[in-house]
Amino acid sequence: MARNRFDVDEDLESPFDLAHFRRAMVYIRKQKKPMILAFTLSALSAAIGLSAPLILQHVVDVTIPEKAHGALIGWSALTLVTIVVSVILATIRSRIMTRVGQDIIFEIRSDLFRHLQDLPFKYYDDRPQGKILIRVVNYVNSVSDVLSNGIINFILEIVNLIFIAAFMFAVNVKLSLIILAGLPVFLAVMLLIKTRQRRAWQAVSNKSSNLNAYLQESISGIRVTQIFTREEHNEGIFTRLAASFRTVWMRALRYNLLIPFTVDNLSTLVTAAIFLVGLLALGPAEVSFGVILAMSSYAARFWQPILNLSNLYNSFINAVAYLERIFETLDEPVTVTDVPDAKALPPVRGDVAFDNVTFAYDPGLNILENLSFNVKAGESVALVGPTGAGKTTVVNLISRFYNVTEGAIRIDGHDISLVTLRSLRSQMGIMLQDSFIFSGTILDNIRYGKLDATEEEVVAAAKAVCADEFIREFEHGYLTEVNERGSKLSQGQRQLISFARTLLADPRILILDEATSSIDARTERLVQQGLNELLKGRTSFIIAHRLSTVKNCDRIMYVSDKGIAESGSHDELLAKRGLYHRLYTAQKMEA
Ligand SMILES: Nc1ncnc2c1ncn2[C@@H]1O[C@H](COP(=O)(O)OP(=O)(O)OP(=O)(O)O)[C@@H](O)[C@H]1O
């Protein structure tokens, strides 16, 4: 499958349908109580607002002609009270709804993060990180207002519309029908642009995703960019991406602006029609001038909620483009997960067996074929061989980061695809090629896999891998703050820290993928001594390009041609004078 690049728009695998919206309702329903409260406050505030014209009418028609000064002050005070109460209610509503919006964001974001934690390596292999980040951060923000205020305003505007329609029909049915005559035209415009508008907002979400992906990639790769002085070239790429975002945004906005434009013009036309029909066709016998004035005012009032509703529809269409992405992520299948009746893997001795394992990252492209081998508990096995032969793939399969395509992997006789992932991985210590350092202290980093480890245990693990000495040399020792890129640390120091992290968990099976590649020869010898101690009684798989580091392993497996080409101890393989011998002598000559 083609890798999803920053300049490749994401296809929507599942088209948006109502079921997606129903899913959004799950988040909204949780906020039912505050939303009903906010709705009630809005309705109250609107009702109180409506009383002002009534008071005005009474004051003009009754109070002023009667010159009732006391009553006038009373009505004025009441008007002031209605305004103040209305403002207070609106403020409370807006506070409630801000909270509701934030709660919805919180819920969706938490669900996304939880799901992302479970998604297999394969998911991350196939997409730029920026495209994942933007969903959790920006898209969720963009939908919150529609899912909270949008829904309430939608209901309020509908109620408003019904009220206004009822009032205007009560005043004059014929002129009311003229006001309604604009509706089919409006609906036709909406229908006409509906699909294009949705596509336009999907394009906006795609282009912003691309932009984000490139930005993220550029920041991660800034060192390489500067080394190769690619800044100008990269600026060009960024400008192109930003320009295409601008273009699609402008296009999407054009559709959005078309709607108020249509509403404004229809409202004006309808008002003009009322005057024309009222004055010329119906005449003063049927409608008084007061009725015409009232109906023209209703026409404007009637089209206002329609305009508000269409603006809400715009935001809805916009939000849908983001919701699709959010749900697409939430629907991403967790392909590597516990089978329905998975059992916990009991504490293992550490026998590992590959039984006719075939594996492909992408269908049809087998990386391993019919691979079989048995490793006894406590045995140390080195995986060597040319770059890209599949060594990392073999160890990734033992930890079940990917599911095998065919065959089975067994630990102590248990098929690992039938046991729980947690029970499997918690008994393994895996040190990947990339010694990732998390932001926090060195202590936090070593403790990452065993949060209840005491400080003494952390120090003991660090000592075992010869990390203690350099850690203590930092001003704050184990409490030294490091960041994600581990930029305060050298590559070798990062490796030693993640080494200590792996060993602290006291795993039965150890996997070390190029774990010592960045450590200098002297430290490596020391680490090797510590390692030899720690490897005792544990099954270990060690991948190393430097053969000097693995020659003491119980067994060396030479991985090539989708399988194990040679297997045996260092001496046996040398005596065989095959592939391993060739690799070893070549390295010796280089040294
Ligand atoms: N996530 C992936 N998706 C698709 N193909 C992959 C993926 N990871 C590795 N491959 C391919 O699988 C093959 C084996 O890769 P693997 O990383 O296992 O090799 P390796 O022997 O560990 O290499 P090295 O010594 O360079 O680390 C390579 O051809 C590689 O291109």
Image (spheres, rainbow, N blue to C red):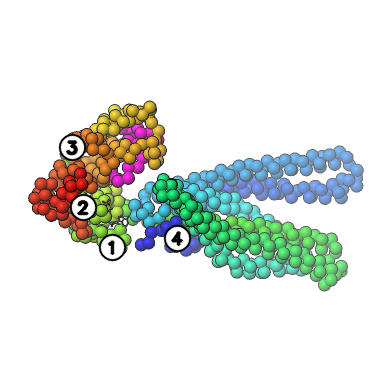
What number is the disc on residue 385?
Answer: 2
Residue 556 left/right relative to 252: left
Could you say where residue 169 lies in the image, as x and y percent from the top left? 74, 63
Could you say where residue 456 lies in the image, as x and y percent from the top left? 29, 28
Q: CA distance from mark 3 to mark 1?
A: 37 Å
Q: CA distance from mark 4 to mark 2?
A: 35 Å
Labels 1 and 2 touching (C-beta < 8 A): no
Going from N to C along the chain, the mark reached first, 3 or 1, is 1
Q: Quadrant of the C terminus?
A: top left
What number is the disc on residue 365?
Answer: 1
The span shown in magenta is 428-453
Q: Nearer the viewer, mark 3 or mark 2?
A: 2
- Residue found 67% across the figure and 60% down from its top: 260
- In the figure, 33 relative to 195: above or below? above
Labels 4 and 2 touching (C-beta < 8 A): no
Could you tell me if residue 26 is visible in this image? no
Could you say where residue 354 lies in the image, as x and y percent from the top left? 19, 54
Say what secondary structure mark 3 lies in. Answer: helix
Q: Which residue is mark 3?
A: 532
Give neighbour class at mark 3: few <14, some 14-19, many 20+ (Cα, 10 Å). few
Q: Which residue is mark 4?
A: 8
Q: CA distance from mark 1 to mark 2?
A: 19 Å
Label 2 C-beta lies within 8 Å of the nearest ligand 1 atom: yes
Q: Amino acid at mark 3?
A: Asn
Say what secondary structure mark 2 lies in. Answer: loop
Q: Nearer the viewer, mark 4 or mark 2?
A: 2
Magenta-span inclusion, residue 199: no
Along the line of sight, which residue is nearer the eye, 105 or 476? 476
Going from N to C along the chain, the mark reached first, 1 or 2, is 1
Magenta-span inclusion, residue 430: yes
